[in-house]
Every structure is written in structure tokens, then in C-alpha cells.
Amino acid sequence: MRRLTALVLVLVVMAAGCGDDSTGATEAPATTGATGSTAAETTTTAVATTTTAAETTTTVAPIVTIPVRELAFDPLPDTTVWVTFADGTLGRVDATTAELQASVQVGPVDALEVGLGAVWLVSCEQQALISVSQQTVAETGRWDLGACPSDLAVADGAVLVALADADAVVSVDPLSGEIEIIVEIEAPTSVDAGSPVLVGTADGQVALWDRSPEGSFSHEWTTHLAGNVFGVIVNDFWWPDIDLYVMVIGPDGRPFIVVLDADTGEILDSWDPDLFEVFSFLVWADWVFAAGGLPGRVWDVARSGGDPTSTEVPMLSSIAGVGTPMPGVPPQVVAVGGDGESSSLYTVPTGGGPATEVGELAPVPASLAAAAPPPLYCPPDHVAETRQNIARMAADADAIYSGKAADLNTNAGTLHQQANDLADRAPQGSEAREEANLAAGGAAGAQMSYEIMNGDAFTLYRLSDTASKSCDPQVLRDIEDVAETTLQKIEDRYREMEDSLRDGFRYLASAEGKL
């Protein structure tokens, strides 16, 4: 629990350090990799502004003038599952109804994870890491990896990506965009992280690096298994106890699963799923799942003991855990399958039995499925209210930053361009040029506020993820306090953006009238 407390202190310093940044710049700052999105549920009432420059008319989206709190989104329910489809779209799905709530085009995808307020996807064809807002379901970032990614993990405020053809695992900082090699190992095929970082390779190596609270890595051990490592999982659901699960495709093409000791790498348990052409591996609470084809079947076994069982799913392509696991209660697992031309969502009974079709997803085949990792189990009502409040503030941050503030940032770019064009046309030393420069300054101020807001929103996403892994009331109260302060900063920055743009467009209109 000391590690969590240390992280809270780091985030307190981060949050406090962002409070005094100036927004008085008069030049447009460089933008990050984030792209704006529109929250369809929110209606604005301000009147659109139209300006004319060099015989080109551009209509600018309205400046938002509604109270920030009215933008609040509720945290997504724990029955939310994310599904990729053969046409390159990512969809947010309600697992209780199979309703496809929203979707975005992301291109071909090879793996996805959920965390830090986003869905993270990697694509070998695009050699890219992509982020999508959980709330607005809009692409918010894209990073060029320069190599083919094979797997990814989200932990401790960073995204880790295995690059098999670069013989490395890299860490991507979502804020700065910096990509840093943290592990060099031949042909990494899979990666996962909690406190340790676990990596599997094409030649059967499984290696563990421990991560200090300061972020440095130290190699602890390597275990050699016969075959190609398909997936590795760090299961910290029962924190502070950690179990390491590894699926390997043996030389005969058949999978086997082992549980490794986190301290030594020794094998503690193993299973041989009766599957072929495995394409999905999942550990949810204390149950182990695998999915394979010919025919499509989901295999499961309880870590505590008992015989494995399996369930057939038509044209099965992937599985995901949903809901909040409870001790002694079988977890909820869903599968995506279909008829080869369309896709459907199914519930998979733990411990055997027929799958139940929840409903059709889309008129195209589905590919992958993922859900947010389960929170650390705490006694009923012990800290649930505090955790929920922190999650709600993170959702508020996403609603403000990824939604309407992104729209305002787009408007700021338009204003900056129009103001510069007008300044070029205005006579040197004229009042029109002076006001055009003031308009450009308003745009730059709004963009600077948005940049600062980006850091504050990321802090809240990280706080929410950290809270989901703690049952300590004092730690959670500390997180809640920082979250409250950080959300207030985001709201203040949002209002600064409104004021800067309102002044900027006013100066622009005045300057246009004086030409």
C-alpha cells in the first residue's frame, strides 16, 4: 500500500504544479497528438460567427456558454465492452443488451486495452498506437511506433507496447508523446504490467522486470518454456498477492497454460486446454479462460480447483470479462461471434452450459473484445462511494476535455488562422492590424488553456485507475481530494477558453469592419 500512497503524493505535486501556468501567449502553441470530438448529447445555444477573408466564407462553430457541470457524464457501467470489427471500426457495447452505443473508425487493429480514460489500440499494418476516449468514442491520439506492435498493456500512467520486430518493449507517455525503450528482449510477443512488467517471447522466454515507485526497471528472472508465448497476464485482483499466467503454443500447435511464482518464476500450476487455433486468453478474478476455433469454444477453469469445462460459440472471435467480480461468485464473460457475415454478442456460462445470444452487434464480423480491468475487491460498502465519486470526476474530466473543450480548441485554430490572414491584409500600424493581433492572442490563450487542461485530465484518469486498486480509506480520501482540486482546474481552464475565444472573435469582427 506504500506504493499507492507514493503515487498519490506524486500526483499531488503534479496537480499543484499545473495551477500557475500563464495563458497570456500571443502565438499559437504547438498542438499535441490529441484530436477533438463532439459530444452529441450536449446542445449549445450561442450564435455562430461568420467571417469573410479573401473571398472565402468560413462558418465557425458556436462558442459554448452553458455551465460546465451540465456537461458531466456518468462513469461507464462495468458491463461496458469494446469490440473491433472487420471494417476497421471500434464500438462501445452494452453487454446487457448488445446495443452498439457509439463507434469510430480506427483502421485494422491487432490488440486493445482499456485504461487511463481511454481505449488503447495497436495496429501492425499502421505501425501505430491509437487512443480513443471512453466517453466521447472519438480518436484522441495517434503515435507512430516505427515497427510492428504485437501486444500492449496499460499501467502506472503509461502504455507499454511490445515490438516483436524491433526486439524491444517501449513505454509511451500519453502526455508528452515520448517513446522510450524500457526492455530489450528478442521477439517479444506479449506484455502485461501491474507492479512488475511481464514479457513473453516467440522462443518461449518469460521474463519479469520489477518497477520501482520512481519508474526504474530491474530484471528479476527469466523462465524458459517450450513453444511460442501467446499471452502473459499479471493478475493483481487479490492484491497484494500477484499471480502470473502464461499461455504458450507448444511445438505441436496445442496450447498450455502455466501459473508462475512472481518471486522466482517457478511453475505453480498448469492446464492443457483442449483447443486448437487459440485466439483469446483471459484471467478474470480467479478464473482462467481461453478461446479457440474449430469449432469455436470457450474453455474455462477455476484457479482454486475443479475440472475445466467448455462452451461452443458460433464463429467465435474473442472474449472479455464484464461486471465486478466477487469472491466465490462465478465471473461474467461475454463472447463475440456470429454467422460469418454479421456479428453477435453472447454470454458464456462459467463452469459449462450453452452460450446465450444477447443480440446482434453489427452487419459485419467482429474481431476483438476487451473491457476495463476489474477493480480490487473490497468488502461491500467499504469504500464504494469514494471510488464511485473519483470515477465520476474522471468521467467529468473526459466529458469536458475530450468533448466540448476539444471543439473550442478547433475553433481556436480557425480563429488564429483567420486573424493572421486579416493581419496580413491590414495596413502596417493600422487599428485593424492591432485588433487582428489581439484576436490571434485570444486564440493562442485558448489553445494554451487546452494544453494545460490535457495534463489535468490525464491526472484525473490516472487517479481513477489508482483508486480502483486500493481499499485503504485514507489513500482513497487523499486521491479524492486531489481529484476535486484537479477537476476544478479543468473547469477553470474551460471557462478561460470561452473568455479567450469570445474576446478573440470580438476583436476579429471589429478588425474586419475597419478594413
Image (cartoon, rainbow, N blue to C red):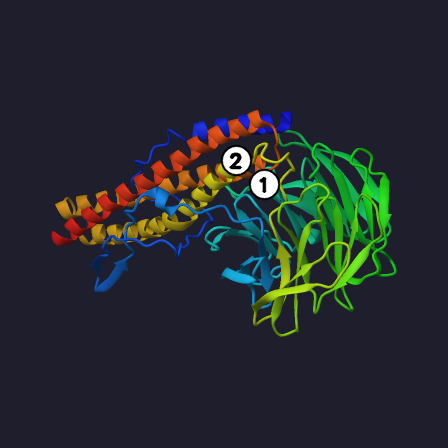
Residue 276 sits above or below residue 186 on the image: below
Q: Is residue 30 left or right of residue 217?
A: left
> Which numbered tag is attached to residue 385?
2
Examine the rendering and report whether any part of residue 185 can be seen. no
Instruction: Classify the position of the N terminus by image quarter.
Output: top right
Task: Depth check: give the residue in front, 138 or 199.
Answer: 138
Instruction: Classify the position of the C terminus by image quarter.
Output: bottom left
Q: Position of residue 489 (x, y in %)?
A: 39, 34
The earlier-in-sequence mark between 1 and 2 is 1
Disc 2 residue type (three-letter):
Glu
- Res 213 quadrant in image: top right
Q: Position of residue 106 (x, y in %)?
A: 53, 60
Disc 1 residue type (three-letter):
Ala
Task: Depth check: give the residue in front, 448 or 242.
Answer: 242
- Res 364 quadrant in image: bottom right
Residue 379 sits above or below residue 350 on the image: above
The local secondary structure at tag 1 comes to strand
Q: Which residue is mark 1?
A: 158
Examine the rendering and report whether any part of residue 133 can be seen. yes
Residue drawn where x is 52% and y is 39% of the image: 388
Task: Depth check: give the residue in front, 329 or 462.
Answer: 329
Task: Classify 10 Å Cα crowding around label 2: few (below 14), some (14-19), many (20 and above).
Answer: few
Residue drawn where x is 28% and y is 54% of the image: 62
- C-alpha distance separating marks 1 and 2: 27 Å
Q: Is residue 240 left or right of residue 407?
A: right
The local secondary structure at tag 2 comes to helix
Task: Classify 10 Å Cα crowding around label 1: few (below 14), some (14-19), many (20 and above).
Answer: some
Q: Position of residue 357 (x, y in %)?
A: 64, 65
Q: Residue furthest left?
A: 514
Viewer-nearest of labels 1 and 2? Answer: 2
